[in-house]
Amino acid sequence: MTADEYTGGTGTGARTSTGRAARDEAGTDRDRVRTWVGSLLAAPDPAALLTRALTEGLAGLGAYGGSLFLLDDDGWLRLAGYEGTDEEVIRRFPVVAPDSPLPAAVAVRERRTVYGISDDLADRYPDLTLMRTSVRFVVVPLAVEHDRTLGALVVQYDGPVPLPPADDGLLTLVADVYAHRLEHLLAREPHGPDNNGHDGNGNGGDGNGPGAGERETGRAVPGPSAGTGGIPGPPPGAPAFEQGADTDNTGEVGATEAVREPTAREPGKPSATRGGRGHRRRRDRSGRTRLELAMSKGNIGSFEWDIPSGTVIADERTLRLFGLDPDRFDSLAESFLRAIHPDDVDQVRGVIADSLEKGDHHAAHRVVWPDGSVHWLESKGAVEQAPGGGPRLMIGVVWDATEERERAKRRESRREFVLNVTNSFAAALTTQDVLDTMTGTVLPELGANALAIHIEHEGRLLLAGAVGYPRETLDRLRVMGTVDDNPMAEALRAGQPLFFRNRGEYVRRFPDPRLRPAEQHGAYVFIPLTSADGTVGSCLISYAGSREFGPDDQIVTAAIAGILTQSLARARLSDLFRRRMTDLQELMMPRALPRLPGFEIAARYVPAAEGMQVGGDWFDLLPRADGGASLVIGDVEGHSAQAAGVMGQLRTALRAHADDGYRAEHLMARGNRTLWGLDTDRFATCCIVDVSPRAGHLQIVRAGHPSPLLAEPDGTVRELEVPGALPLGYTPDDRYPVFHGQLVPGAALLLFTDGLVDTPDRSYEDAVAAVSRRLSAWTTRPQHGGTDRAADLESLVESLVTEGPAHPGYDDVAVLVVRRTSWESGPVKMAG
């Protein structure tokens, strides 16, 4: 099984995903396979090979230990390496006979994978004391070219017995790669004595090498040590093993030979071997064929760099991965460097320098192909040292990591997109806020140019808002929810988005003229918006031209659907609650202000847009029997139904006290005692202005409230220096000094709450100055007679609450403007 063929999981069960998701998982698995395949093929020695097989290739199967048995030329299996295996097991089985019932012998003899549990071994070998009971293991024969077997790989793991098919396939793939790399490592070792008593280097041998009865295998073989994965030498009296030996001239171990009786040997005399250095080279060439097939399936290239000469031996895949022509390759390392992206050359040189010093190589960089395309490559390898010291050879593998990088980039892009959209929707408190967020954030990110959102209402889908559609299409969108067979209803029934790549697909599915899309749009996505509580609505996103929708589009659309559904549901609740609170506020505010002869009066209240609840701002005009009136403006602390309730009580009390004849000073005192007696923790600021219509005389008292602004007929605006007192509700017997002033014909007095000048980006003084400039400009503008003059005052208060210095909707705003027009006097007349 090759790396590309393996698409199963590395857990305890087989993959069952299908479709596009399965292909995505398979791509990820291939990347993992390429990584550990490269690591195994770059293992510098058998010990490292065993370690990497367990910790990288088989880690996903729960492998924690294992051992390697090599097949001797007489059919016996010799323990050649181990890691994470109990010492008692190692001591008990240094060699295994060809006809033994032990799993290692069975796996090699029958050339099949053998599973088992340690309890079974304990039953057969009562004298064996295992460090762990119920150890699960699997033995895989290490087969190479021409059906030869090098030995057996024993793996201890935590998992089911046997493994699921997908994991069993991974085990087979690891064994194949392991066998090929092991064959290469064994073939590189200096050869032992041949049949004539000569060593593999042409020197004579007397059979009296190191250790009686042992043969020199070239490299010094360390003894076993716990957890090192070392390659132990044969224990005393155990059959020896000559690395790289075959049982016949064909290099094959026959089935009959694999179970033959062991051959007796004389102590100190090496066993007969066939083949020599030439046969090893022949076996090397044959072994490369199968390894080449496995690497070609994974698109993995290999290379050997002779560091002193600067020459590189590379396969065709490596050259093509670098964009080099195999027919023109000059075998120089500099040719590879010239193919690397200019911005990555210095980094690669630094990585190579570290690799030559540390012995391990791992690099990731870009290359530029002759056609100008840029590709990401990743390489791993090992550096061999020369006998006299210093790096001699780097052996490694390389593969194309472009797709992996692009997937990672797309994942990061999707993550940032979803994060940005989520943060944007978090501040959306109304349905209009949601529409604005979709228009300003989502559409540009998707590359779309039109949007329509329908909201469910009493079983119908009503158009809540749209952008980017012509008028005739908007008319069709309004009736789309009433058509029996419409795309929004189909998406809701299916429970997933409907994608139309072009206009033709859409028209074929929905030919009804009432559902015809806009001419300037060529691709469409209908997104159902449903939650656990039911249907919220539907969203239509349109693109200017035709479009292919891939997996990323589906993932992003699903994320948008979830976020948009939650935001709309929250906004609908907010809208409903706010409407109710606004209705409550309006009920507590005067429906119309009384008419005051000789004066023009206009007022406006705007609740804060931020937050779901209204505040306690209010204004009022309280007429008096003498023809004058008391102008009142105030602000109860807080933004809630409780604040609005306190405001309503306070306003009612002030109206009642005014009817009893109380003027500004005593009216404020009565209001203070009323609020004190309400037993509430809330305070209120207030300003009361008594206006005498005959003389235009003003009496003003202030309780913690902003001072009024007086605009003279010549445009001069000043803040009246009204002495203040504490806000209402602090103490029951507070006194309120009276400010006396005059309102001449043509002059205007502005009362306001702090929401008009409360802004985080400028000081109170700067905000008051900005309001004063607007008031001055209005005062000096040409005035019109008749009813237009009152309309002109209405436009002033409207501009103050919508275009004033404070951010619109930052806080509640109430303004009251009175302008004296003549010296007329008489009784106050009520409006209407």
Image (spheres, grey):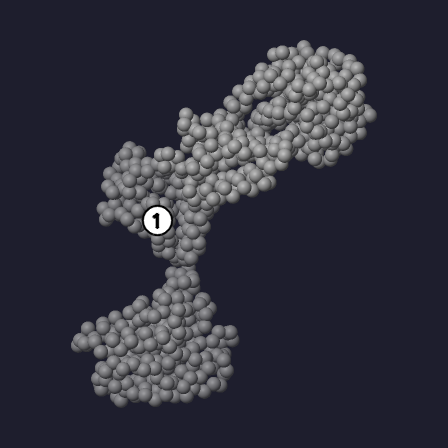
> In screen coordinates, is 783 left or right of 814?
left
Res 802 → quadrant = bottom left
Res 404 seen here: yes
> In screen coordinates, is 494 left or right of 357?
left
Q: Residue at x 73, y 19 (%)?
A: 205
Res 158 seen here: no
Q: Residue at x 78, y 24 (%)?
A: 211
Most foreground residue, 124 or 341: 341
Residue type at tag 1: Pro
Most foreground residue, 600 or 351: 351
Task: Judge whether 138 appears above or below 227 on screen.
Answer: above
Most foreground residue, 71 or 446: 71
Most foreground residue, 570 or 585: 570
Q: Residue at x 76, y 25 (%)?
A: 210
Task: Judge whether 755 appears above or below 334 on screen.
Answer: below
> In screen coordinates, is 135 left or right of 411?
right
Q: Read off the residue under disc 1.
A: 444
Rendered location of residue 703, percent (x, y):
42, 81
- Furthest toward the right, the residue is 127
Task: Judge whether 438 appears above or below 244 on screen.
Answer: below
- The N terminus lies in quadrant: top right
Rendered location of residue 438, percent (x, y):
36, 51
Callout 1: helix, strand or loop? helix
- Furthest toward the left, the residue is 785
Q: Residue at x 61, y 12 (%)?
A: 250
Res 146 → quadrant = top right
Rendered location of residue 139, percent (x, y):
66, 24
